[in-house]
Amino acid sequence: MIGHFPRANTLELIGNTPLVLLQGPSEAAGCEIYGKCEFANPGASVKDRAALGIIRDAEARGDLTDGGTIVEGTAGNTGIGIALVANALGYKTIIVMPDNQSSEKMATLRALGAELVLVPPTKFSDCNHFVHTSRRLAQETEGAIWANQFDNTANRKAHIDGTAAELWEQLEGRIDGFTCAAGTGGTIAGVGMGLKAFDDSVQIALTDPHGAALYSYYAEGELRSEGSSVAEGIGQGRITANLEGAPIDTQFRISDEEGLDWVARLLREEGLCLGLSSGINVAGAIALGKQLVDSGRENPRVATILCDTGFRYLSSLYNREWLEAKGLPVFEWLRD
């Protein structure tokens, strides 16, 4: 069974994460809602999978050799995964990150020994965007590769071969729907492709935060954003290589407020401390579950991704002053 065997090395700790039935979301949806516990990876996020897949692919192609350096632009979690995998394999790491991401992510990357380069947040069209900056650094660094998580399809392959297959096994071949938000698009596309290969009737839904453009793209065929979100690591304004051909059947747009409500409920009612992307995913899973129930599916099962740990956001999501400054609701237990 998944998770019940010794690992030959530490990299085998990545993946094979637990799946849990979420009681409150299941009750709200009127069907079974499951969360894939990606915070159980060594780097405490789903991005460990992409990190390992990208690095192993670069090794197989001969692009990454002994003593080499991996350079990547990231909101933080992919960088953490890359740093851990690189440490285990003897590589160096340079991470470029927008300076508005959580201080916990920055401190973690420095603690892992990565060289951290912070840049101001800007639009992708700006040559100083963190992705473009990381590409230039890779070109300028001897013996370096650029991980390129957004357009390197080794990212989504890690989810086709890993995450999707695990979900299929854990749910014993009975899964009716899957949803999650998109950052690079690797998870939603890879899991979607993998599950569709098992059963084409599985419904794949994009759950998009406000401020991202994919909801309108899949709903209307046009990349157009509305509003904004404080969620880190999700939200996309273009069709990345990982998203090309993604089998998206339907789409939902979820507000930060709704996502935060589920972050609060999952902590207080079920003992799970999660980030906002997980709350948004869970809200999307409930929406998909209700849609499947309304369509007549009998006792549908929906799975989503619990992306990372809430301990990575103690200075933001779990901080009263930060929430108030963003105009977001403060968790009840933080009010006094």
Image (tube, grey):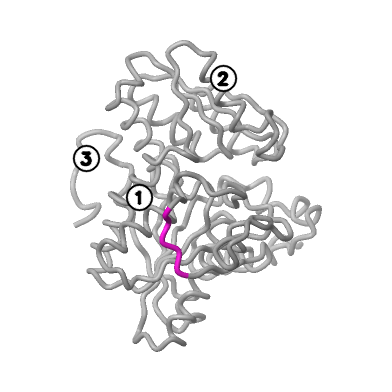
Look at the image and say whether residue 90 sits in the magenta stretch: no
For residue 296, above or below residue 38: below
| Percent coordinates x, y for residue 329 in the rendering | 74, 64
Residue 321 can be seen, yes or no? yes
* For discs 3 and 2, the disc positioned in front in the rendered view: 2
Mark nearer the N terminus (3 vs 1): 3
- Kind of residue at badge 2: Leu
- Kind of residue at badge 3: Arg
> What's the distance in space between the residues labelled 1 and 2, CA to CA?
28 Å
> What's the distance in space between the residues labelled 3 and 2, CA to CA?
35 Å
Seen in the image, is 69 located left or right of residue 13? right
- Quarter placement of the C terminus: bottom right
Mark seen at residue 7: 3
For residue 119, above or below residue 209: above
Foreground residue among 270 and 183: 183
Q: Quadrant of residue 42?
A: top left
Q: Considering the numbered disc 2 on the image, is that residue within a helix, a strand or a loop? A: helix
Mark seen at residue 159: 1
Q: Which residue is at 30% across, 41% downward?
A: 13
Q: Which residue is at 39% across, 59% downward?
A: 36
Q: Which residue is at 32% across, 47% downward?
A: 15
- By secondary structure, the bulk of the magenta-drawn segment is best described as loop
Q: Residue furthest front?
A: 221
Foreground residue among 42 and 287: 287
Residue 34 can be seen, yes or no? no
